[in-house]
Image (spheres, rainbow, N blue to C red):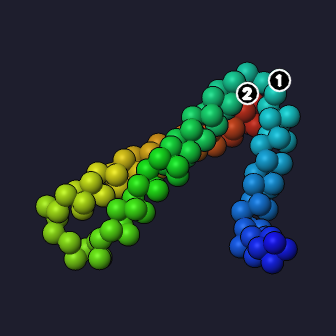
Amino acid sequence: MIEQLIHFWLRGWRSAFEIILLSVGIYYGYIYFRGTRGAKVLTGLAIVFLTLTLISQFGISPKMSALRASLPETNSVAATDPVRVQFNALHAWSTRLEGGVLLLGLIAVYLTAQQLSGS
């Protein structure tokens, strides 16, 4: 039992640290912007940002991993193979979602910069 906990900690300490760091950053960002006119917009962007990320990570990525595991090598399979076609479709959706996350992140950075400059 203890050996499993140690293994879990050694394997996942970076993720735990990143989550704690992100939580602290979000908390202080929220405290700073709480009374401003941009707080609701940034909060909405953050919710959409996180929702798209969760859909990608828990909806699409596991399906892609399962399909990838069923293929010997993705590039060696014919483009008309049904599994390859399904994998490519999921990859396209994953790319769209992550592109949306990137766009929302850029909008949030722009709005934050505008808020900080006082415009």
Q: Residue 67 vs residue 9: left or right? A: left
Residue receiving disc 1: 35
Asked if 48 appears above or below 85 in the picture, the reply is above
Q: Is residue 22 visible?
A: yes
Quadrant in which residue 36 is drawn: top right
**Image quadrant occupied by the N terminus:** bottom right
Q: Amino acid at mark 2?
A: Ala
Marks 2 and 1 close (CB-CB < 8 Å) = yes
Asked if 52 appears above or below 74 in the picture, the reply is above
**Secondary element at image label 2:** helix
In the image, 94 versus 110, the foreground residue is 94
Residue at 75%, 54% in the rendered image: 19
Q: Residues within 10 Å of mark 1 (few under 14, many from 20)?
A: few
Q: CA distance from mark 2 to mark 1?
A: 7 Å
Instruction: Give percent across and percent down for residue 85.
Output: 22, 56
Q: Residues within 10 Å of mark 2 (few under 14, many from 20)?
A: some
Asked if 79 appears above or below 102 in the picture, the reply is below
Residue receiving disc 2: 39
In the image, 77 versus 35, the foreground residue is 77
Q: Is residue 103 visible?
A: no
Q: Amino acid at mark 1?
A: Gly
Q: Residue 101 vs residue 115: left or right? A: left
Residue at 56%, 45% in the rendered image: 54
Residue at 76%, 37% in the rendered image: 116
In the image, 66 versus 22, the foreground residue is 66
